Image (tube, rainbow, N blue to C red):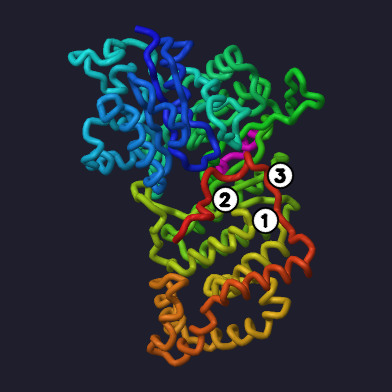
Amino acid sequence: MANKNVLLIEPGYRNKYPPLGLMKLASYHGAFGKRDNVKFIKGEEDRSVLQKNWDRIYVTTLFSFEWREISKAIDFAVQCAQGNTSKVFVGGIAASLMHQQFLNEKRWLGIRFIKGLLNKSPAESLMLDDFEGELYADDTSGAPIEDLVPDYSILEQIPYRYPVHDAYFAYASRGCVRKCHFCGVPKLEGAQRDAQPITEVVRGVESRFGAKKDLLLMDNNVVASPNYRNIIAEIRDLGFERGAKFKRAGMRIAAQRRVDFNQGVDARILCKDKMYLQEMSTIAIKPLRIAFDHIGARKPYEQAIRFAHEVGLHDLSNYMLYNFHDSPDDLYERMRLNIDLNELLNIRIFSFPMRYQPTDMKDRSHIGEKWNRYQLRSMQIILQATHGIVSGAPEYFKRAFGESSERFHELLMRPEHMLFNRAWYDEHDGRGEFEEFQAAYRKLSVDEQRELADLLSNSRLSEFRELLGSAQSAAVNRVLPFYISPVHTELERIWNTMRARQAQAEVVSVPEDELVEDAGLTEAI
């Protein structure tokens, strides 16, 4: 039954890693499997696929807040199927976490929405109906698609270049021992368990597509595995020991190999025994990512950092969840702790604040109970200036986030144009106007600051002029005019003047393949 036409579609969003699920489906259908004709596209720009008769179409999904791009991809898949929705299969993270919402879309009636992993027989995982004579519905004993070697060749079919591409993508373990309320892993993967040996994936990829420089492990909590020591030993045996180099034909200079547990490791386990980090220090890990999701985790997090320092792991990175149950003070304290540890231990930790969004929400509009919309927008502007990174350099940090929690609060409530053009208003011609604003703002009581935040949070920037004189407090009314943005020609004059006056601003440089998957820095709040 070979030679069928199979179309794989990834929505047109920007993402860091290739679609591993589609790569495994390509392995199932392609030259190493059923020998079908496999075509991979990203987005809807390749209209040539509309001219072909497809026997099966798969669409992958990633983050729930990419609903718009996901919807466009599914609609395009239905178009490619000439309206025959029974040929269309949709899976991945969003399709699993928002399963019922996908099913509720009447225009997608008949599409198979796959929930969870493809870890059963192909026919069972894909919900194929043998009675209807569906393609490969009789494959009830084949290897699970989840366990197949991913097909890297499909990545050459699209012009999009993933920041991380020269790497083996694998899992040493699946699931997690935790049940954090902000995380979708318990619903997606269930309890912690070991996955297939990494060696099988690495050797399989190497034999078919050549050796890769890096090893990217997508485990959710590898240190919780009872097989942890063996996993680390296996990574060393595969040529990813500390200091390992890689050189393929045509390379003049050998490159440093890199192991990345991209979902981070658990400080609550690391702090219990130095063994975990001693083992980690024997492989080419870069960076060591440790999550620091709330201030209550301060003690285990700090102990984990100290253990890392003691075993010689100084290239550190961490995720900081905010906009969940935390407050701006909580976030500032966590960011500031890293600065203090950097100075104390002579290390450099790069932090990546990640704005929480519910895993079943179609956009990024969620506002945590202790944040407001204006603060979140200001935080986004600050992170845009730092490329989403909280640098370990003390002076850089103070300039970006303030020298205290109180100053951080004030930054979050600055007029947007004064925050975006901070140097102009802090140090140059706009300083007089900024000092007037600051004097007026600092006279506000706590209740007046809350009234101001409510007014600003419930209006868009273009509507701020309509707020003038609308506050109950006279003091708030005196502050409101400062929030009216200058006209565009004036902003252009500021930008041009600052470009002429200033040398290039300091930019913290982190390689693209070490940045976070999605920081949401360009999305409207």
The residue type indicated by label 1 comes to Ser
**Horizontal side, residue 294 vs residue 276: left or right:** left
- Per the image, the residue denoted by label 1 is 391
| Residue drawn at 43 percent across, 15 percent down | 37
**Pointer 1 with pointer 3, Cβ within 8 A:** no
Residue that badge 2 annotates: 301
How crowded pointer 2 is (Cα within 10 Å; few <14, some 14-19, many 20+) is rated as many
Query: Which region shows up in magenta?
Result: 269-280
| Of residues 437 and 222, the one drawn nearer to the viewer in this rendering | 437
Instruction: Name the amino acid, label 3.
Output: His
Q: Of tags 2 and 3, which is closer to the observer? A: 3
Distance, label 1 to label 3, CA atoms, is: 14 Å
Q: Earlier in the sequence, mark 2 or mark 1?
A: 2
Is residue 242 covered in magenta?
Answer: no
Query: Where residue 467 sits: x, y (%)?
Result: 41, 82
- Does dot 1 land on a helix, a strand or a loop? loop
The residue positioned 54% from the left and 47% from the top of the image is: 291
Tally the numbered discs: 3
